[in-house]
Amino acid sequence: MFEGIKSSARTFSLAGKGLVVLTVVVLLIGWLLNTPPGLLGKADAIGYAVCHRIDARSFHLGERQIPLCARCSGMYLGAMLGLTYQAVFSRRRAGMPHWSVWIVFAAWAGAFVLDGVNSYMHLFPGAPSLYEPQNWLRLLTGTGMGLVMAGLLYPSYNQTIWKDWQRSPALQLRSLGVLALLALLLDWIVLQQNPLILYPLALVSAAGVLVLLSMVYTMVWVMVVRAENHFGRARQLLFPLLGGFGTALTQIILLDLVRYLFTGTWDGFHLG
């Protein structure tokens, strides 16, 4: 789909550009027409592809469940926060973190796994567990994991895309501390469950799924056509990003389709 280039950035042939645009437009229109109505409905369809969406394990806008469960909401909000923070303060820095940051990442990832396994065990009556799961713990550990994802994805993306990426770490221990405080504040805001604030945050968390997948698939396409480190300006990334977005959307469509064929409903899984 992508054409090789000999200049400072990879470009598409005219036919390739048209094919990418047409494919993405068709996929997007088809998905929009066949998913629940409204912004929250579309966000539900994104969450439906990656999250169990169990009602009891989710936050609510009044009586309405938000698109992602508490853990996934925290994970994608944390990832969006981490990516935004690094985009503002680290720009094209792409060095991997200091070992001290890796220790924090490992602790957050460990807490995510521990709480996830403990929560999963509660699906089975009588199964052993360490403690009673709580949505605030799901949110907290999910947010920590989201920061880990952002901390690894952002420098990897910069190393893959930009020809002028900087070798200094995108995150240092001090900046990670600031980011952790911002994440705690974000979680506290979510826990208030104020509909005026939770509504946009619910949309942001769902958008985070598309953003992360699009970044990953953009990197994949760039590596497939061997265009690593050929980009100097954001506008040169238009079609690689469009290809990444289209691939991410395709994944969501396929997962939505498979799940809907098996369940026959856009609802989350039901306990009991």
Image (cartoon, rainbow, N blue to C red):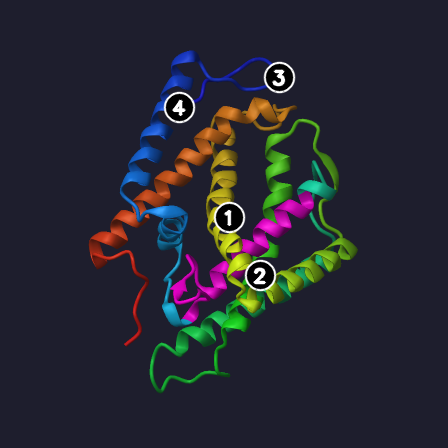
Residue 138 vertical position relative to residue 4 in the rendered view, above or below: below
Which amino acid, mark 1?
Gly
Q: Does the magenta stretch include residue 79?
A: yes
Quadrant in the picture for the C terminus: bottom left
Residue 189 quadrant: bottom right
Residue 143 vertical position relative to residue 117 in the rendered view, above or below: above
Give yes or no for contact between labels 3 and 1 (Cβ–Cβ under 8 Å).
Answer: no
The kind of secondary structure element at disc 2 is: helix
Residue toward you, 40 or 73: 40
Give yes or no for contact between labels 1 and 4 (Cβ–Cβ under 8 Å).
Answer: no
Q: Earlier in the sequence, mark 3 or mark 1?
A: 3
Rendering coords of residue 241 (x, y %): 50, 31
The span from disc 4 to disc 2 (Cα, nearest Å) is 34 Å
- Label 3 crowd (10 A; few <14 / some 14-19 / many >=20): few
Give yes or no for contact between labels 2 and 3 (Cβ–Cβ under 8 Å).
Answer: no
Which amino acid, mark 4?
Val
Which circle marks residue 143 in the picture?
A: 2
Is residue 229 shown left or right of residue 257? right
Q: Residue at x 62, y 51 (%)?
A: 81
The span from disc 1 to disc 4 (Cα, nearest Å) is 22 Å
Circle 1 is placed at which residue position? 208
Count the marks.
4
Which circle marks residue 21 in the picture?
A: 4
Rendering coords of residue 264 (x, y %): 20, 56
Label the magenta part by its dominant secondary structure.
helix
Which circle marks residue 8 in the picture?
A: 3
The span from disc 3 to disc 1 (Cα, nearest Å) is 30 Å
Q: Is residue 65 magenta?
A: yes
The kind of secondary structure element at disc 3 is: loop
Which circle marks residue 247 in the picture?
A: none
Rendering coords of residue 39 (x, y %): 41, 47
